[in-house]
């Protein structure tokens, strides 16, 4: 099988894995019904937290992060490590496969085929992907997210700040190919938060709550 075919297969596999809507499934199983009908209507962990079930939200974070992480890890371990030239950079095929699989998993989470391409915002999935491929960068971004979340209690602001930090941190701590993939995904996260950005500017954004909110 050609290297191109391998990359395509990893991309398809990553997308299908990423498109599993764990937040939606878990809320149905827990008896909360359709998570898309409460709060922001999002299927991610922040909206799951609006049910008041902290453990369900935590499980959603773990599973959503695992989707892209598992896809990247599988490609990294199962693809032959051969050096290739890509845009003037030497990149190993297993690394490129991991970047493709993980990135497509995040796209699958954002635009799942099962939900008419209306999914989450990819924050947890992006974290899991970076954690597998560049752990130090992931931990730095997690630290930024936690500081912003604790100080301001806006999940969206914490995610936006972390996303804005991605290109700079990855530029100093990773090879250029990582920076390109990470920066593209960070831009996707920012685009997916466009409504949150508008609400933040108007002072209308919801803060992090640990109690169940009304529909």
Image (cartoon, rainbow, N blue to C red):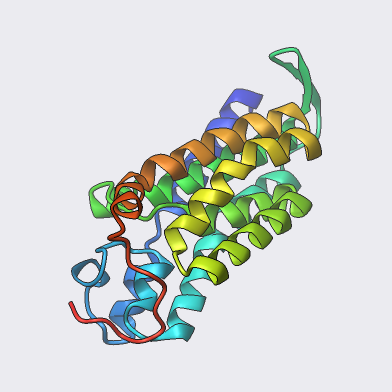
Residue 30, x across and y down, in percent: 33, 86
Q: Report the side of 119 relative to 214 (left or right).
A: right
Please tell me whether residue 30 is drawn above or below residue 49 in the rendered image.
Answer: below
Residue 133 in sight: yes
Q: Nearer the viewer, residue 77 or 143?
A: 143
Looking at the rendering, which quadrant does residue 183 occupy? top right
Residue 56, x across and y down, in percent: 44, 81
Residue 95, x across and y down, in percent: 73, 37
At 40% across and 86% down in the image, what residue appears?
53
Name the image quarter holding the N terminus.
Answer: top right
Q: Report the side of 129 relative to 58 (left or right).
A: right
Looking at the rendering, which quadrant does residue 140 occupy? bottom right
Count all numbered tags in the image, as a single digit: 0
Please tell me whether residue 49 is drawn above or below residue 107 in the rendered image.
Answer: below
At 39% across and 77% down in the image, what residue appears?
49
Residue 58, x across and y down, in percent: 51, 77
């Amino acid at each position: 099988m050609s290297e191109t075919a391998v990359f395509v297969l990893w991309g398809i596999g990553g997308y299908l894995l990423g498109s599993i809507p764990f937040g939606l499934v878990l809320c149905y199983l827990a008896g909360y019904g359709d998570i898309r009908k409460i709060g922001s209507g999002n299927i991610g962990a922040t909206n799951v937290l609006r049910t008041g079930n902290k453990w369900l939200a935590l499980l959603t974070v773990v599973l959503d992060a695992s989707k892209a992480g598992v896809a990247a890890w599988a490609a990294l371990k199962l693809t032959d490590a051969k050096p290739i030239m890509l845009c003037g950079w030497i990149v190993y095929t297993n690394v490129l496969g991991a970047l493709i699989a993980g990135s497509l998993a995040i796209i699958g989470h954002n635009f799942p085929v099962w939900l008419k391409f209306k999914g989450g915002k990819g924050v947890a999935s992006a974290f899991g992907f970076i954690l597998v491929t560049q752990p130090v960068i992931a931990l730095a971004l997690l630290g930024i997210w936690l500081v912003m979340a604790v100080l301001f209690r806006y999940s969206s602001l914490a995610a936006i700040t972390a996303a804005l930090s991605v290109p700079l941190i990855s530029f100093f701590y990773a090879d250029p190919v990582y920076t390109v993939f990470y920066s593209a995904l960070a831009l996707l996260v920012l685009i997916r938060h466009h409504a949150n950005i508008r609400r933040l500017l108007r002072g209308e954004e919801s803060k992090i709550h640990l109690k169940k909110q009304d529909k």
